[in-house]
Image: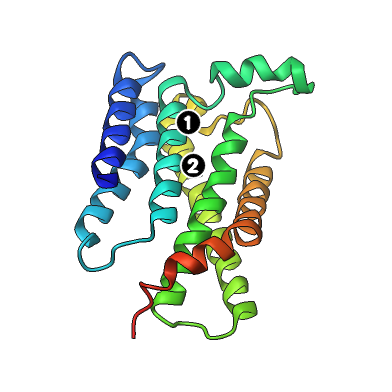
Amino acid sequence: MMKYTWLGIFFLTLLWSAVAPKDYPTWVLEVAPAVIGLFIMAFTYNSFRLTTLLYILILAHCVVLMVGGHYTYAEVPLFDYLKPVFGWERNNYDKLGHFMQGFVPAILAREILIRKAVVASAAWRNLFIISICLAFSAFYELLEWAVALLTGSASDAFLGTQGYIWDTQSDMAMALLGAGTALLTLSGVHDKQLLGKINP
């Protein structure tokens, strides 16, 4: 039942996102990771089924990507409304996206490292998880840079920098914050769900 609910939410959000987005090329770039992730999960569903917690987190991340793809990350209406409430000078939806870019991969990396028994020590495992999340964040920033070089001014909506010169650094800082927050708040719940999945 959960599988079909998950798929229903994913495809309904994807369909909504695809209807008259702000910019179709930007929509494709923003939504592509969610669609690629869906194919990977479908391919590995029987051989490496994830915990319920992780599936929920991945879906939440996909929704964030699709909303950003529909409006562009600099123009999500809710975060425009929040600007005067919090005294922001910019639309900070992209910071939520980069927080999720650390938060969700941290639990994904944790699940793989534990189930594959890659690292025995919890302290070393957490260090590896943080490093993996930062590496992924840096790789994504390099992809954004490549898109900017290839498309010129057309990349503005994808980058979502809004004139902020420290955007790249703050994006990676948000991913770091997300990864650390996930490890601090979800490790206990994750451990309980992993009990029946740890490989012998």
The residue lying at 51 percent from left, 83 percent from top is: 119
Q: Position of residue 168 (x, y in %)?
A: 63, 43
| Label 1 crowd bin: few (<14), some (14–19), many (20+), radius 10 Å | many
Whether pointer 1 and pointer 2 mark residues with C-beta atoms closer than 8 Å, the reply is yes
Quadrant containing the N terminus in the rendered view? top left
Q: Is residue 181 left or right of residue 10?
A: right
Q: Is residue 121 visible in the rendered structure shown here?
A: yes
Could you say which is closer to the camera, residue 193 or residue 161? 193
Q: Position of residue 40 (x, y in %)?
A: 26, 55
Q: Is residue 6 left or right of residue 164?
A: left
Q: Is residue 135 visible in the rendered structure shown here?
A: no
In this rendering, the answer to whether 90 lies above or below 190 is above
Could you say which is closer to the camera, residue 117 or residue 159? 117
Amino acid beneath label 1:
Phe
Q: Position of residue 170 (x, y in %)?
A: 68, 44
Amino acid beneath label 2:
Glu
Quadrant containing the C terminus in the rendered view? bottom left
Identify the secondary structure beneath mark 2: helix
Q: Is residue 198 left or right of residue 184?
A: left
Q: Earlier in the sequence, mark 1 or mark 2?
A: 2
Identify the secondary structure beneath mark 1: helix
User: Mark on residue 158?
Assistant: 1
The residue lying at 68 percent from left, 47 percent from top is: 169
User: Mark on residue 144?
Assistant: 2
